Image: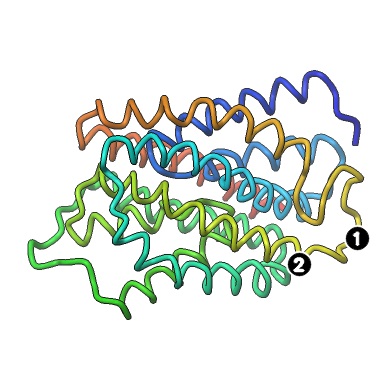
Amino acid sequence: MDFQPELLLELAALGVCSGFLAGLLGIGGGMVMVPFLSILLVQRGVDDNLAVKMAIATSMATIIFTSISSVRAHHKRGTVRWDLVRGLAPGIVIGSLAGSMAVFAFLKGSYLAIFFGLFVSFSATQMFLDKKPAPSHQVPGTVGLLGAGSAMGFFSGLVGAGGAFISVPFMTWCNVLIHNAVATSAALGFPIAVANVVGYILAGSKVEGLPHDAFSYIWVPALAVIALCSVLTAPLGAKAAHQLPVKKLRRTFASVLYVLAAYMFYKGFGS
C-alpha cells in the first residue's frame, strides 16, 4: 500500500477533526475515525471485512494519545471525576481484553459494522431525548462500577471507540453533571485504549492479507499522522466543551453519532 501525499492530507484532516471532537464530546475520536478509515483502507485495496477490523484497531490505538491530551485540558478545569476513573478502570481492563482478544477476532467485519451502528444509534437516542434521570439514581458501589467498567471495555473493543457512547449516558443516568461526564469519559479512554490495543495486537498477529505497513491490525501510518494531529486539537475541543450549554452539548454529541451510525449500517448490510 503506497503512502501518497493526498493520503497524508486526508489523515491529517481526520486527526484534526477527531481530536477536536474528542475534547469536545469525550468520545476519543473513535466514532469519527472508524467509518473514514474503513473508506480509506478499502480505496487502497484492503478487503472490506479486514478494512473494518483494521479501522477499529487503528482508531483505538490513536485514542491512547488523544485521551492524554484531552484529559489534561479537562483536568486543569477540575472536571474529571477521578474517583469514578479509579472505580471503573479495573472492569474496563477485564472487559477490553475479553472483547479485543476473543470476540473481535472471530466476528466478521460486516457484523462488527452493524454492531457499531446499533450501539451508536442507541446512545445517540438516549442523549438526543435528553431524558432526566431520577433524583434517586446515584453512582453504584464497587461491584456495580466493576460491572459497568467491564461493559464499557468490552463493547468499546468491538467498535474501536473510547467508551463514551456507554460511559457518558451511564454517568448522566447516575446524576453526574454532563461536563463532568464528558471529562471523565476522556480519562477513561486511556485504559480502554491500552487494554484493547494489546488484545488487537495479539489477536491479529497471525492474520493473513494485512498490508505491509500494518502492525497486526493497526495501520501504522494512519496511527502516526492522526495521533500527531489529534493531540494538538483535543485541548481546543475541551475548551469549547466548557463554553457550550448542556443541552447543546448533548444534542451535538447525538447528531454526530447518528450520521456515523448510518454509514456503518450501510457498510455492514452492504457487505
- Residue for point 24% across, 72% down: 140
Taking the image as shown, residue 46 lies to the left or right of residue 11, namely right
- Residue for point 70% across, 51% down: 52
Q: Between residue 261 and residue 9, name the one nearer to us.
A: 9
- Residue for point 85% across, 23% down: 4
Q: Quadrant of residue 269?
A: bottom right
As drawn, 107 above or below 226? below
- Residue for point 40% across, 43% down: 26
As drawn, 203 above or below 81? below
Taking the image as shown, residue 184 lies to the left or right of residue 22, namely left
Percent coordinates x, y for residue 121 in the rendering? 42, 51
Q: Between residue 123 and residue 188, name the one nearer to us.
A: 188
Question: Callout 1: 10 Å neighbours few (<14), some, many (20+)?
Answer: few
Percent coordinates x, y for residue 107 in the rendering? 69, 68
Looking at the image, the residue that sits furthest to the front is: 76
Q: The disc labelled 1 sits on which kind of residue?
A: Glu
Say which residue label 1 marks.
Answer: 208
Helix, strand or loop status at disc 1? loop
Say which residue label 2 marks.
Answer: 202
As drawn, 230 above or below 9? below
Question: Callout 2: 10 Å neighbours few (<14), some, many (20+)?
Answer: some
Q: Quadrant of residue 36?
A: top right
Q: How is the image coloured?
A: rainbow
Helix, strand or loop status at disc 2? helix
Q: CA distance from mark 1 to mark 2?
A: 14 Å
Percent coordinates x, y for residue 96 in the rendering? 56, 67
Percent coordinates x, y for residue 250 in the rendering? 28, 40
User: Badges 1 and 2: C-beta atoms under 8 Å apart?
Assistant: no
Q: The disc labelled 2 sits on which kind of residue?
A: Leu
> What count of labels does the image hold?
2
Q: Mark 1 against mark 2, which lies toward the viewer?
A: 2
Q: Quadrant of residue 174?
A: bottom left
